[in-house]
Amino acid sequence: MFPYVALSKDKAWQPGPYDGVELMVLHKHADTGGVVVLRKFKAGHTIPAHTHPNANEWAYVLSGEWDESGVSYTNGALFFAPKGIKHGPHVAKTETISLTIFDGPLTVV
């Protein structure tokens, strides 16, 4: 038996840090503040370049397509953004859903 199970049907989408972004928090680590989220980018939205000063970020694209710096990320793409390294802007070509993990508090600057 797994000590923790999250079912998306039991969770709700909530506003993300930018217009056009929603998050569904699947798990939050009590000690580190790290989170595992489903992240939804609405089609046509651009998320500006930013950094996460307190966490490394891994994102696996489950559906959709977004562009960043001339590179298209689609289903099955995995990317890593190290803590404190600027990345973006993200341009949502279609509605895009990713499974995203932050190993520390989700802060954006």
Image (tube, rainbow, N blue to C red):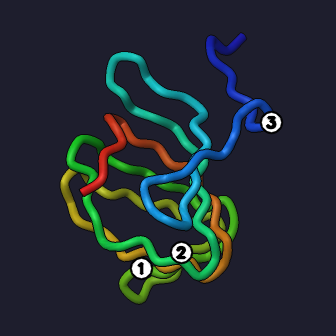
Q: Nearer the viewer's eye, disc 1 or disc 3?
A: 3
Instruction: Classify 69 as above or below 98.
Output: below
Which residue is outermost to the right? 9
Q: For this view, does 86 lie left or right of residue 96? A: left
Secondary structure under the numbered disc 3 in the rendered image:
helix
Check contact, mark 1 vs mark 2: CB within 8 A. yes
Residue 96: where, in percent of width, then height? 63, 67
Secondary structure under the numbered disc 2 in the rendered image:
strand
- Quick one: label 1 or label 3, which is nearer the N terminus? 3
Residue 69: where, in percent of width, then height? 36, 84
The kind of residue on which mark 1 rests is: Glu
- Quick one: label 2 or label 3, which is nearer the N terminus? 3
Residue 57: where, in percent of width, then height? 37, 50
Residue 86: where, in percent of width, then height? 23, 65
**Distance between the alpha carbons at the discs numbered 1 and 3:** 30 Å
Q: For this view, does 109 lie left or right of residue 90? A: left
- Residue at image mark 3: 9
The kind of residue on which mark 3 rests is: Lys
- Residue at image mark 2: 73
Which residue sits at x=49%, y=55%? 59
Which residue sits at x=58%, y=66%? 41
Q: For this view, does 97 lie left or right of residue 86? A: right
Name which quarter of the figure residue 79 lies in.
bottom left
Q: Residues within 10 Å of mark 1 (few under 14, many from 20)?
A: some
The kind of residue on which mark 2 rests is: Tyr
Question: Residue 68: which disc?
Answer: 1
**Residue situated in front as seen by the camera: 60 or 46:** 46
